[in-house]
Image (tube, rainbow, N blue to C red):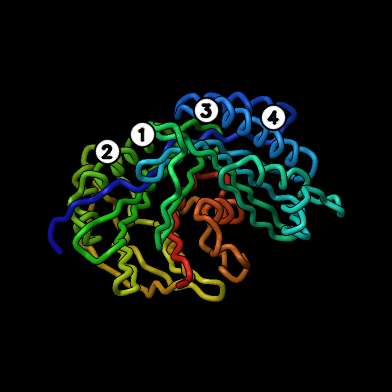
Amino acid sequence: MGQVSSTFVAEAGDVCWLRADVALAAAARHQAAQLARGVHLSAEHTARLELCVTELATNLLKHAHDGALALRVVRDRDRAAVECLSLDNGPGIEDVPRALRDGTSATGTLGIGLGAVGRLADESGVHSLRGRGTVVYARFWAAAAGGAAPEPQPHPVATGGLTRPISGEQVCGDSWAVRAVSGHGPDALTLMMCDGLGHGPLAARAADRAREAFRDSRHMDPAAVLGDVHLGLRGTRGAAVAIALVDLGEERVRLSGVGNISALVASEGSRSGLLSVPGIVGVQLPRPRTFEAAFPPGSALIMHSDGLSDRWKPADLPGLFAKDPSLVAAQILNQAAVRRDDAGIVVAVRGQRP
């Protein structure tokens, strides 16, 4: 595979994590307003965003055993939005459709306010596991230059990801990115998951450099892109990196990885692992190997760092892989993250055929 042109799709950015405590609602409103100004949300959209994070914060404090809000700016090609994710390890929601319909909870479990969230946000969703926790997302799109929020463009594969720093650090050593590539059939994508060695600013610097090298690469073959990232990481402490090519023409995923990155294609009842080889990208790059797996409609590609346990099973997450990829990433992180490490995950979800 030769050189190709590529187009930015999405990548990791700063995420503000707010733990559930008595000051959560006020802190969330303040942070949401700052992010809204950064992407030029309208006054009406900003007010709706602030109401939404207040509802989610109140939900967490009233009903969840433990939880957090994650606030960030997300970008999808030429669009930008403020996104709020609510993650908890609470009792779950017994009847999600009812909670979304009328915003009530007859059983006293997490659910109050979800109807309001759906009415306030441009996009929203929820995934709940009884006795294990709930994740909610809400997204508010910024208006284009002409004044109206751009209409969402359907894509056969939707992507998203999430990172969380180790407790006590402000920056995360994990990062991810997605780009569209030409020359290999329609809708081809390459994805990168990177785990900078260690924690803190030096690990984050390696992760940022990896993302830059991935963005600048003009290859689509995963092994060749990995070689470009290796060159970009020279002089840093190095990283574990995996590069995947999603090929819809052949309905397959090809992956080359070095270091401890977990990658798999999952559906409701199965998972197919994609292996990485030992080494350190930027320091000691072994001869790359490429592994493949089928990528049929209704499946999801998941790549994550060792900040998440690899013992989770798709069957334990019923209904998840039909959801928005941000919701998929957040729920897997919610269920599998290791508190003593940075955590990062990127997801590509392929919709069912019409």
Lower sequence index among marks 3 and 1: 3
Residue at 67%, 32% in the rendered image: 51
Lower sequence index among marks 3 and 4: 4
Whole-percent x, y for residue 13 in the image: 42, 38
Residue at 58%, 45% in the rendered image: 339
- Which residue position is annotated with label 3? 42
Query: How far apart are the two marked residues, 3 and 1, measured between alpha carbons?
Result: 37 Å
- Given residues 117 and 60, the one toward you in this image is 117
Whole-percent x, y for residue 145 in the image: 38, 31
Query: How far apart are the two marked residues, 1 and 4, measured between alpha carbons?
Result: 32 Å
Q: Is residue 168 above or below residue 198?
A: above
Query: How far apart are the two marked residues, 1 and 2, measured between alpha carbons?
Result: 8 Å
Determine if residue 303 is in view: no
Q: Secondary structure at mark 1?
A: helix
Determine if residue 135 is in view: yes
- Which residue position is annotated with label 4? 25
- Which residue position is annotated with label 1? 202
Please tell me in which quadrant of the rendered image residue 122 appears. Answer: top right
Query: How far apart are the two marked residues, 4 and 2, measured between alpha carbons?
Result: 39 Å
Query: How far apart are the two marked residues, 3 and 4, measured between alpha carbons?
Result: 21 Å
Lower sequence index among marks 1 and 4: 4
Whole-percent x, y for residue 207 in the image: 34, 41
Tell me the amino acid under the disc marked 2. Thr
- Which residue position is annotated with label 2? 236
Tell me the amino acid under the disc marked 4. Ala
